[in-house]
């Protein structure tokens, strides 16, 4: 039972991370006033967010600083929620925030942080 709960939470965490990148890209597309600017923002902003995530917040991040991991998660997830809000997906923004908070709490409660998505044999 614990194994299924663990995998469900880690899968949800990954889906929320991908969703955050998609939401940031969606905002970038809607924020631009020309096709070139739309492409730059829709592709560039998620790349910047993914790089920050990989450096500071990923389970095997380059820098193992818990405060930077928290700051990065707040920045990326907060930007995603704001992005959804500003493209008029307000209900989606609220649901996204609730899911992020619930998932982070479940991961913390289950002591899953730092767990790599691979089964322990």
Image (spheres, rainbow, N blue to C red):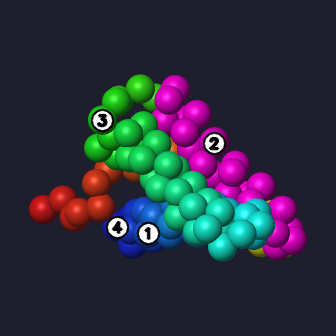
Residue under the point 41% across and 26% down: 65
Going from N to C along the chain, the mark reached first, 1 or 3, is 1
> What secondary structure do most residues of the magenta stretch adopt?
helix
Q: Element at badge 3?
A: loop
Residue at x 33% of width, y 40% of height? 61
Can residue 117 be seen from the camera position used here?
A: yes
- Please indicate whether residue 66 sits to the left or right of residue 95 in the image: left
Among numbered discs 3 and 4, the one appearing first in the sequence = 4
Q: Give the number of the mark in front: 1 or 2.
A: 2
Q: Mark 1 or mark 2: which comes first in sequence? A: 1
Residue 62, numbered label: 3
Mark 2 vs mark 4: give the one in front.
2
Location of the C terminus (image quadrant): bottom left
Above or below, 43 against 76 in this view is below
Magenta includes 15? no
Q: Tell me which label, 2 or 4, sits earlier in the chain.
A: 4
What residue is shown with label 2?
75
Q: Residue at x 72, y 69 (%)?
A: 34
Secondary structure found at label 1: helix
């Amino acid at each position: 039972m614990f194994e299924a709960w663990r995998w469900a939470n880690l899968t949800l965490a990954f889906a929320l991370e991908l969703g955050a990148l998609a939401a940031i890209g969606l905002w970038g597309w809607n924020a631009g006033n020309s096709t070139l600017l739309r492409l730059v923002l829709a592709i560039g902003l998620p790349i910047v967010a993914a790089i920050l995530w990989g450096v500071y917040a990923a389970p095997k991040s380059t820098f193992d600083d818990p405060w930077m991991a928290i700051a990065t998660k707040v920045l990326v997830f907060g930007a995603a929620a704001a992005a959804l809000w500003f493209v008029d997906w307000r209900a989606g923004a609220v649901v996204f925030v609730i899911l992020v908070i619930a998932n982070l709490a479940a991961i913390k409660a289950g002591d899953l942080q730092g767990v790599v998505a691979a089964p322990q044999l």
